Amino acid sequence: MWGFLKGDKKDKGNEQDASEARAQPESDATQTEAGKSGWLARLKSGLSATRDKLGTQLGSLLGTHTRIDEALYEELETLLLSADVGVASTQMLLSETRQRVARERISDPAQLKEVLKQALLELLEPVARPLVTTSQRPFIMLVAGVNGSGKTTSIGKLAKYFQNDGKSIMLAAGDTFRAAAVEQLRTWGARNDVQVIGQQGGDPAAVMFDAVQSAQARGVDILIADTAGRLPTQLHLMEELKKVKRVISRVSADAPHEIMLVLDANTGQNALTQVKAFDDALGLTGLTLTKLDGTARGGTIAAIVRQKPIPIRFIGVGEGIDDLRPFDAREFVDALFD
């Protein structure tokens, strides 16, 4: 039977207290690290694999050339492709670079790093659009993604982020087929003192219907709805996701107000397939990039934006509850090249 799944301290007792106690050192450590090295330093650490190519290797490459010629452009193309920038976005960045070199009569190869950096920044700045949740109440977010993308964890972090902004939050556990997913969201709800509506083994659309009605009745600012992780090739599950969207729209005519896809930054070019499939099914309005924790293929972001300029709302650099931040294009580009 569906209903509120808010963490109950009477039932959890010492187990919850112990869990919170174990989580506290991690939270303190995260805050200490953030205060010591800053967000940009942590982002650079997360993008270290890509920065090795666009920073270190790019610098070495430019240092071996005395002039800007076709041979250098070919090597630049290979380097960008190896950084998962993608074919279309690599061609676009090189085209912009060639035009600026000709326009400004640049002859020093060392200057190409700054030219490429500026071209990437101009590509990403238009999609660095913060999520505005004040247009509706409740503001309803539908969050989708494949298994393992960090979707449910990101929802918990989003709840904390919006709470810090003074918003009241409700969560909907729409991944009803996986008991662990409902329990995971319930844990996040207890941790953030947020109500969770869900049921195990039931109809996800029914859960969403009840959650939207409950959020409306209680005057909640933001409802964040989880969905079952699925692959784009699982057509029957994608159809179910479309049904969830339709049901939400029946309860609230202009909802969902945000349809967000969570992407694992380690998936590289496979992220393009995910974006296209979920966008075709749902009409995406935002992206969140997670797991920027050292092995991430950060160049993929250029390929995604070149394929379709969907707003990038948030990026995540770690496991801590505060490790999800709004996307800043300049910070991101600095972290890739410097």
Image (cartoon, rainbow, N blue to C red):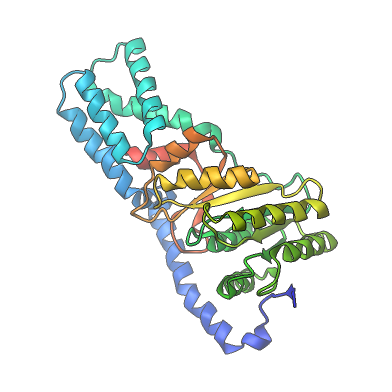
- What is the quadrant of the C terminus in the image? top left
Give the residue drawn at x 41%, y 31%.
89
**Number of residue marks:** 0
Give the residue drawn at x 65%, y 54%.
239
Q: Where is residue 171? Give x, y as percent.
A: 68, 64
Q: Where is residue 109? Give x, y as percent.
A: 23, 22
Give the residue drawn at x 57%, y 88%.
14
| Front-lying residue, 35 or 299 | 299
The correct choice, above or below, for 301 with respect to 162 in the image is: above
Q: Residue furthest right?
A: 217
The reply to whether residue 161 is in sight is no
- What is the quadrant of the N terminus in the image? bottom right
Based on the displayed image, in which of its 4 quarters is residue 206 positioned? bottom right
Q: Where is residue 165? Give x, y as percent.
A: 65, 54
Q: Residue furthest front?
A: 236
The reply to whether residue 166 is in sight is yes
Instruction: Name the side, left or right, on which 48 lies relative to 149.
Output: left
Instruction: Name the side, left or right, on which 328 lies relative to 97.
Output: right
Instruction: Name the side, left or right, on which 160 lies relative to 104.
Output: right
| Front-lying residue, 224 or 92 | 92
| Front-lying residue, 20 or 119 | 119
Based on the displayed image, in which of its 4 quarters is residue 163 positioned? bottom right
Q: Where is residue 13? Give x, y as percent.
A: 61, 88
